[in-house]
Image (spheres, helix red, strand yellow):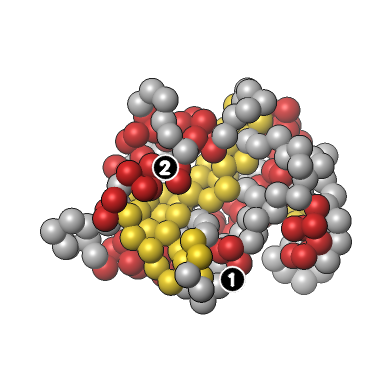
Amino acid sequence: MKRVITIVLAAGAGKRLGGPKALLAWPSATKGGAERPLAIAHAEARLSAESARVLVVVRSSVFHALLAHVQPGIDLVSWTAPDDAGPAGSLAVAAPRIGDADAVVVTPVDVPPARTATVARLLARLEADASSATPPLAVRPRHLGRGGHPVVLRTEALQRYLEADPPPLRDHLRALGNRCVDEEVDDPGVLHDLNVPVDVIRVLGGPPRFLA
């Protein structure tokens, strides 16, 4: 892929987790480094690998808390999200800002940052089948037969999110039919969800904390 960007869907309120998931304290990628908010950890992981730019969609209430962590390549998109806002709304906010990207990595914030090798494999599958009669528009990871995150899409697959009343991404991928394919990966991390405190304890070994 010539140009890849990432969209981090980080506008959830995090009521079940106990705080905004975008601000969940996440360990540094380097030994001895400082913690940073999970939304920024996602952005840094993608910028250090395949992505030229990362759009992080956040609630307006946490926008300023994240500003201190922003670095070149990270675009914070503030959204006054309603309480019942879902990922479809965040995608609709981000879609007009994709620019000249050829492919987009879409990840919810409430998962661990994806491994470089995992995203590379998904992008490779998207590229490998490009010359087929019906090239895929999206690739989902699977591990031990279960689907996970992130998802990679050609930019045209996000056209629906420029229109009125876009569906949840899961429903949109289903509507793509055989234009959405699954790729088995050796990465159990694609199955992790960080929805409640016990999920964070399983992954990090301690209860969730939030960086304000």
Nearer to us of marks 1 and 2 is 2
Residue indicated by mark 2: 171
Query: Residue 138: which numbered mark, if any?
Result: none
Please tell me whether mark 2 sits on a helix, a strand or a loop: helix
Q: Nearer the viewer, residue 92 or 43?
A: 92
Local packing at callout 2 (Cα closer than 10 Å; few below 14, some 14-19, many 20+) is few
User: What residue is rendered at 29% in x and 42% in y?
Assistant: 156
Q: Residue at x 77, y 65 (%)?
A: 202
User: What is the C-alpha distance between the residues marked 1 and 2?
Assistant: 23 Å
- Name which residue type carries label 2: Asp
Q: Quadrant of residue 157?
A: top left
Compared across the picture, whether 116 is left or right of 196 comes to left
The image position of residue 110, as x and y in percent, is 65, 50
Residue 61 picture location, percent across and down: 73, 28
Q: Secondary structure at mark 1?
A: helix
* Residue 42: x %, y % from top left: 61, 54
Quadrant housing residue 16? top right
Which residue is rendered at x = 24% and y = 65% of the image?
A: 129
Residue 188 is tagged as 1
Can you say whether 187 is above or below 193 in the image?
below
Image vertical order of residue 56 relative to residue 45, above or below: above
Lower sequence index among marks 1 and 2 = 2
Quarter holding residue 204: bottom right
- Please give the name of the residue rendered at 54% of the width and 38% of the height, measured from the top-left corner: 87
List x then y, in percent, for residue 10.
Answer: 62, 41
Would you call the spot at circle 1 few (<14 residues within 10 Å), some (14-19), or many (20 or more)?
few
Residue sitting nearer the eye, 7 or 90: 90
Which residue ends up furthest to the left in the rendered image? 133
